[in-house]
Image (spheres, grey):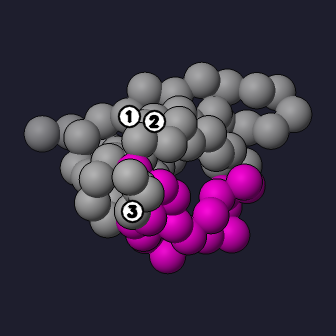
């Protein structure tokens, strides 16, 4: 049985990801790298709205691994500048 390919939406940040393809077969182990890293910034990654664990490679950046689901998926990165001044509550 031939596995169907599904689209991976990178939330408009395609330039930030290395190794990413627009589609993957369901069940494929996906490994891509997020390389637009700034100092003093915290990063979080989400696949279909659920937090995604990640590793780090000094040469390639954040290492994201997941199994492609059997539907179109959305991979998003959220970043927060840790040096920003916050108003006291």
**Image vertical order of residue 36 relative to residue 27, above or below:** below
The reply to whether callout 1 and callout 2 are in contact (CB within 8 Å) is: yes
Counting other residues with Cα less than 10 Å from the Cα at mark 3, is it few (<14), some (14-19), or many (20 or more)?
few
| Residue beneath disc 3 | 4
In this rendering, the label closer to the viewer, 1 or 2: 2
Label 1 and label 2: CA atoms lie apart by 8 Å
Q: Position of residue 26 (x, y in %)?
A: 39, 50
Label 2 and label 3: CA atoms lie apart by 17 Å
The reply to whether callout 1 and callout 3 are in contact (CB within 8 Å) is: no
| Residue beneath disc 2 | 66
Residue for point 27% across, 60% down: 71
Circle 1 sits in a helix, a strand or a loop, which is it? loop
Q: Position of residue 21 (x, y in %)?
A: 62, 64
Q: Is residue 4 visible from the viewing direction of this image?
A: yes
Q: Give whichever of discs 2 and 3 has the lower sequence position.
A: 3
Q: Which mark is residue 73?
A: none
Q: Give whichever of discs 1 and 3 has the lower sequence position.
A: 3
Left or right placement of residue 50 versus residue 60 in this view: left
Q: Bounds of the magenta span?
A: 5-26
In this rendering, the label closer to the viewer, 2 or 3: 3
Counting other residues with Cα less than 10 Å from the Cα at mark 2, is it few (<14), some (14-19), or many (20 or more)?
some
Q: Which mark is residue 52?
A: 1
Left or right placement of residue 67 versus residue 37 in this view: left
Left or right placement of residue 36 versus residue 55 in this view: right
């Amino acid at each position: 049985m031939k596995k169907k390919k599904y689209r991976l939406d990178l939330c408009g940040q395609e330039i930030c990801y290395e190794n990413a393809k627009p589609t993957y077969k369901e069940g494929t182990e996906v490994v891509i790298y997020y390389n637009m890293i700034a100092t003093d910034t915290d990063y979080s990654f989400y696949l279909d709205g659920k937090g995604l664990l990640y590793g780090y490679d000094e040469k390639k950046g954040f290492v994201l691994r997941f199994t492609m689901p059997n539907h179109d998926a959305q991979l998003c990165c959220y970043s927060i500048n840790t040096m920003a001044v916050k108003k006291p509550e």
